[in-house]
Amino acid sequence: MLHVYWAFSCLRNVSIALAISIVWSAPLSAELAALTDDDLSEVDGAGIGFVMEDFAFSHGHDPSEGKVFRISGVTDSDGNPVTINVNQMYIARSGSDYGAVLDGVNLGRLDNPYEIDLLNGDDIGLSGKGVLEIAAPRMVDVAQGYDCLDPAALQGSGTCSSRPADAGFLAGERPDLGVELEINDLGQAQTHFNVHAASAVFDGSYIRLWGEDTRMAAEFRLNFYTPALEVSTCAVSDSACTSKMTMSDFKLELALGNTFQPLYIGADNLTGGLTFQIDQMTTDYLANIDTAGQSDGSAQGDIAYAFYDDYYSNPDYRSNISVDNIDIGGTSLGSAKVEGILIQYLDVRFRDLEP
């Protein structure tokens, strides 16, 4: 077995590290062949890790400069066309002033990069499956980590690995993100919808995909932390905008699907619309749980009780949303928090409302 580790720089701002496993045999011969789930489940390569250093992105709609960034094909309830111009979309270093200052930011680092991996399903409770994982930087122990919300956090204050910017590390690893939309509906006044997030962190987020029968199954975790999430309707997003809602210390930890109760992503057979489904959870030996929710004393009952006890108590299966303060147009509404959301059944279907 020969392990080759390959690192290079691409397009000035992107560093990519690859770990490739190669098997040599003699004589050398090869042919392309389809791989089954059993074949893929044996793959244990290190995958691809990528880090973007000094990265900045900005694009917007400005016909005077030959820039067109537009969403079309949308109609209102009367059938009139709706044109959405993306006036600005940006990723930049923290302190960007709504995308006006486009200094570069680091996204990930070599010892904790963004990753694309092919996992052995046997290691995560999916026997005989090959699992594709796309992941943000991992969470770390508190001793090595940083508070996920504090833009001036010091090491040892939390479990996020992404480092905030400081005097000794100007780029930081927590980007400002934003998008500004201009909505033009025939016969209606022009409207705007803007979203900006400061010093954003996605550590611990991932999506895992695998095949199950004829459906695509997924386990999805989205962690999103920002000290300031702003939603506004001003024509120009800046500090002078008063038509806005600001959420301070916004935290979202969303859990959809898991290995035994996955999120299914597909299309409706009748309408062709996108669907997201989580089936009602079942397990063996359910009949061995008594009316009080306890094991009936049998070995099967003990197995079923242990399963349900983990299902209802494991925080990895639950979603949390919290905001330290909600401010609308200068009026503070205080904090809000929803914790321990457990999604046991989900059936979301998208369809075209036109006849």
Image (cartoon, rainbow, N blue to C red):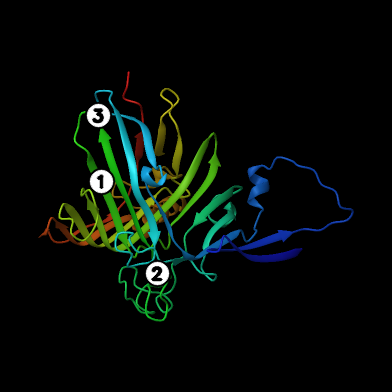
Residues packed near mark 2 inside 10 Å, few (<14), some (14 to 19) or many (20 plus): many
Please tell me how crowded label 1 is: few (under 14), some (14-19), or many (20+) other residues with Cα within 10 Å. some
Instruction: Left or right? Give the position of 150 relative to 142.
Output: left
Label 3 or label 1, whichever comes before in sequence order:
3
Residue marked by disc 2: 160
Which x, y percent locates residue 278?
40, 41
Which disc is residue 186 wearing? 3
Q: Is residue 78 above or below residue 113?
A: above
In the rendered image, the vertical position of residue 152 relative to residue 283, given as above or below: below
Element at badge 3?
loop
User: Mark 3 or mark 2, which is nearer to you?
Assistant: 3
Amino acid of disc 2: Cys
Mark 3–mark 2 Cα distance, whole angstroms, equals 46 Å
Label 2 sits on a secondary structure element that is: loop
Q: Residue 230 is drawn in which quadrant?
A: bottom left
Q: Which mark is residue 193?
A: 1
Rounded to the nearest angstrom, the CA distance separating label 3 from label 1 is 17 Å
Q: Earlier in the sequence, mark 3 or mark 2?
A: 2
In percent of width and height, residue 50 lies at: 55, 61
Q: Are marks 2 and 1 in contact (CB under 8 Å)?
A: no
Which of 119 and 157 lies nearest the eye of the viewer? 157
